[in-house]
Image (cartoon, rainbow, N blue to C red):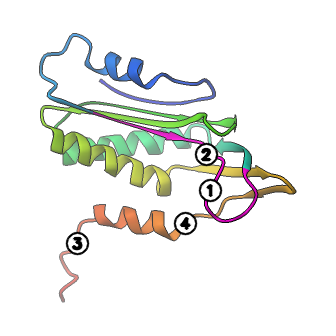
C-alpha cells in the first residue's frame, strides 16, 4: 500500500504504521519519521508562535506521489505512507509523517531519508513563521539542498 495525503487534520504515527503493515507477514522493517513544529529554531531570534504551511493543491500531491514512485524504483518497498499537513500549526504539532516498509531495514531507512530530503526541497509548500514582532516567509535552506544531492546519481558524462 502506497499512500500520500495532504491534510489539515492531525495524524497518529503509530496508527498509520499499523495500517501500513496490517495483515502482512512479509514486512521485516518499518521506519517512521515524524517532523514536528518547534518553537526554538536556534537562530537566536524570538521563539516561534506558529507556523502556517501553504501548498499548491493538486501539484503538491502529484509531486509527492512522484517521489514515492521514485523511491519504489530505488528500493524494494512493500509500502509507504506520506502525510503532510497544512494550515496554522503551533509548536509541538505534527507537520509531516513518512512511513516506509520493506523486507529489510536498509531499504526502509534509505527510502525514508530519500523521501524526507526530497520533500524538503521539491514539494511545493511555503512556510510563514509567526514570531513576537511579526511574521515572515521562510527561505529555502542550502543545507536542505545539499542533503538532497546525495540522492542524485552521478552523470555518466561527468568525467568527460
Name the secondary structure under disc 1. Answer: loop
CA distance separating discs 2 and 3: 35 Å
**Residue 52 drawn above or below residue 41:** above
Main SS of the magenta segment? loop
Count of labels in the image: 4
Element class at badge 2:
loop
- Percent position (x, y) of residue 3? 39, 27
Q: Point out the frontmost of discs 3 and 4.
A: 4
- Residue at which label 1 appears: 41
Name the spot of residue 39 as percent of width and height, x first: 66, 47
For label 3, the crowd category at 10 Å Cα-Cα, with few meaning under 14, some 14 to 19 and many 20 or more, is few
Q: Marks 3/4: CA distance?
A: 23 Å
Q: CA distance from mark 2 to mark 4?
A: 17 Å
Q: Is residue 37 magenta?
A: yes
Left/right placement of residue 108 relative to residue 14 reads left
User: Residue at horizontal 63%, vertical 43%?
Assistant: 55
| Numbered mark located on residue 154 in the image | 3
- Tag 4 or tag 3, which sits nearer the N-term? 4
Marks 4 and 2: in contact by CB < 8 Å? no
Q: Secondary structure at mark 4?
A: loop
* Residue at which label 2 appears: 38
Give me the C-alpha separation between circle 2 and circle 1.
Answer: 7 Å
Where residue 119 appears, as percent x and y from the top left, is: 46, 49
User: CA–CA distance between discs 1 and 3?
Assistant: 33 Å
According to the image, label 4 marks what residue? 141
At x 32%, y 43%, the residue is: 112
User: Along the line of sight, which residue is nearer the eye, 156 or 141?
Assistant: 141
Circle 4 Cα neighbour tier, 10 Å, few/some/many (<14 / 14–19 / ≥20):
few
Amino acid at each position: 500500500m502506497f499512500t500520500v495525503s495532504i491534510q489539515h487534520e492531525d495524524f497518529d504515527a503509530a496508527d498509520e504504521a499499523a495500517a501500513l503493515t496490517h495483515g502482512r507477514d512479509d514486512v521485516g522493517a518499518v521506519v517512521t519519521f515524524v517532523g514536528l513544529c518547534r518553537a526554538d529554531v536556534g537562530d537566536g531570534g524570538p521563539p516561534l508562535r506558529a507556523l502556517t504551511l501553504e501548498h499548491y493543491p493538486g501539484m503538491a500531491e502529484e509531486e509527492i506521489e512522484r517521489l514515492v514512485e521514485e523511491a519504489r524504483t530505488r528500493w524494494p518497498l512493500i509500502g509507504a505512507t506520506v502525510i503532510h499537513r497544512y494550515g496554522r500549526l503551533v509548536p509541538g504539532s505534527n507537520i509531516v509523517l513518512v512511513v516506509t516498509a520493506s523486507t529489510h531495514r536498509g531499504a526502509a531507512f534509505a527510502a525514508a531519508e530519500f523521501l524526507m530530503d526530497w520533500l524538503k526541497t521539491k514539494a511545493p509548500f511555503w512556510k510563514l513563521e509567526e514570531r513576537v514582532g511579526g511574521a515572515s516567509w521562510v527561505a529555502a535552506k542550502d543545507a536542505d539542498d545539499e542533503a538532497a544531492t546525495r540522492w542524485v546519481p552521478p552523470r555518466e558524462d561527468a568525467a568527460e
